[in-house]
Image: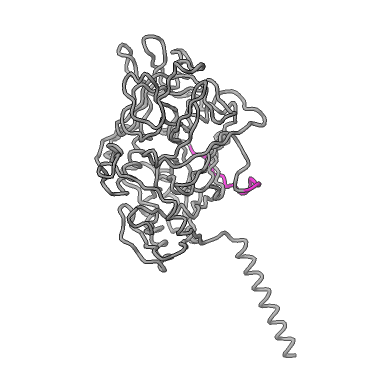
Amino acid sequence: MHAMASQRLLLVRLLVLCLVCGACAAAKRRYLSVSMDQVLRSKAHLDCPPWNKKSVTTTSGNKLTIPAVCGLPRSPSKCCGAFERHVLNHDMNRLSKLLQRSSVSSAAAAPAPSPLPRGIPFFPPVAPPAEAPAVTIPDSTGTSLDTLEFVVTVGFGSPAQNYTLSIDTGSDVSWIQCLPCSGHCYKQHDPVFDPTKSATYSAVPCGHPQCAAAGGKCSNSGTCLYKVTYGDGSSTAGVLSHETLSLSSTRDLPGFAFGCGQTNLGEFGGVDGLVGLGRGALSLPSQAAATFGATFSYCLPSYDTTHGYLTMGSTTPAASNDDDDVQYTAMIQKEDYPSLYFVEVVSIDIGGYILPVPPTVFTRDGTLFDSGTILTYLPPEAYASLRDRFKFTMTQYKPAPAYDPFDTCYDFTGHNAIFMPAVAFKFSDGAVFDLSPVAILIYPDDTAPATGCLAFVPRPSTMPFNIIGNTQQRGTEVIYDVAAEKIGFGQFTC
C-alpha cells in the first residue's frame, strides 16, 4: 500500500515537471546573453565633434534650440573626448534634419522656393510584377568614414562607378556630389562623380513630374533644380538628374532620379552622398516599386566589424522559412511628417515584466521608427520605469559611474558573458518587437571597454515624438511593406 502511494506521488511529480518544462520551452526567453569577447573585439572607435547649439524652425513654425554638429574632427587632438556629445549631437542634429522640409534652390532670376506640393503619390501608378524580384546588397556601419549612419555601396552611371552612401529612412531625395562642383564639394571617400563620363546621364527637364515632386524650381536653361537644407545648416543643392543606378552587378534601375550635388556644404563625414528610403515620391523604395514591389528591408549589423544587408523587394525573411515568425505592426503616417515611418507603441516588456505605464504615455505623441537616430528616446515616465526594473535585474554586476546621458552603467570586467533581461516593444495591434542581445547595452567609453550602459534615454522636452533608434534595431531584420502599410520584425539575423 505504501509502495503504491509512493509510485503515485512520483508519477504526479513527473507530470508536474513535464508540464513546467513544456511551458518553459514554449515561453519566449526572458533573459539574453552576449559574449564579452565578441563585444570587446567588435568595438570601433568613435571621435567626438565640437558642441554648440542652433535654433531650428519646424514645419509647424515652432522654434527648437538643439545641439548641432559643427564638424567631425580629423585627428584625436581635435576630439572633445566625450562619446555622449558625439551621439547626442548626432541625434539632435538628426532630429532637426527630420523636421525640415526639402526645398528647391532657384536660379537668381527665379522666384523663391515654395513648399512641397500636397497630393503627390508615394508610389508610381504602375502595378509591380506578380512575382517581383529582389536584390540584396551589404550594409555596414560608417564609422570608418566619420559618420554614425549606416552605409551601402552602389553604382552610378554607365559604366558604373561605385559610391558609398548613407542609408536614411528619414529622407526622400538620394544624392551624390558631382563635378564640376561649381559651388563646393567636401572631401569624400571616392572620386567625385563626373556626369560627362556616363553614357546614361541626363538632367531632369523642368516640366517633368519628378521636378514637381522636388519642388518644381528650374534654372534659366530649363533644367530642374533641387536643394535639401538640414537643421544644422548643412545642405546639398544642384541639378535633379536621371541616371542608371546599379544595386548589384546584375540589377539596375535605369532613369533613377537623384540629386547631382554641385554645392554641398557642412559636414557629412567621408561618405559620397545619401540614399533616401523615406515614403516620398523621390525615395529609392518609391522609384523601385514598379520593378521590385513596394517592399524593402534591412538588417543593421550587430557589430561594427560585421555586415548586414539592405534588400529592395520582398524575400523570405532571413530568420526562418516561415513568414509567421515575423511580427508585423501597422505603419502609421503623420500629416506633419508624411515621409517618416511611425509605429504605435503601447508598452514595454522587460524580462517578462510589463512596465506599469499607461499606453497613452507612448501614444500621445507617437513613436518614430528611424534608421539614422542612434539611441532610443522614451517618455521620461517610461524610461524611469524601464531603468528601475533593469537595475533590479542586474544586481549581480558592479555598477559603474554614469556616462551622460546614460545613467545606468555597469563594469563587466572579469565576466565572460553578460546576462540581461530581454526587452520588447509591444504595439497596439498585438505585435511584438523583441530586441536582439546587442540592442540593449551600449559601450560608450573606449578607455573602459568593459563598461556597458543601458542604451535608452529619456526624451528631451524639445523632441516632439518618441524615437526607436538604430541601436535597438541592430541584429534584427526590419521589413517595410509600404504597400500594405506595415513594418515587420524578424529575429536576430545579422
Horizontally, residue 48 falls left or right of residue 207, namely left
- Residue furthest top as drawn: 221
Does the magenta-highlighted stretch encompass residue 17? Answer: no
As drawn, the residue found furthest toward the bottom would be: 2
Residue at x 40%, y 18% (from the top left corner): 239
Image coordinates of residue 445 in percent, x first then y, are 34, 53
The total of numbered circles placed on residues is 0
| 61, 56: nearer the viewer | 56
Residue 266: percent from left, percent from top? 31, 31
Percent across and percent down for residue 31 are 51, 62
Inspect this view and state whether residue 180 appears.
yes
81 lies above or below 486: below
Residue 176: % across, % down? 42, 26
| Colour option used | one colour
Left or right: 319 as drawn, with respect to 211: right
- Quadrant in the picture for the N terminus: bottom right
Q: Camera-side residue: 266 or 186?
A: 186
In this view, 375 is above or below 206: below
Span of residues in magenta: 320-332
Quick check: can you spot residue 114? no
Magenta span contains residue 322: yes
Classify 239 as above or below 154.
Answer: above
In front of the other: 335 or 127: 127
Q: Residue at x 35, y 64 (%)?
A: 399
Q: Nearer the viewer, residue 211 or 333?
A: 211
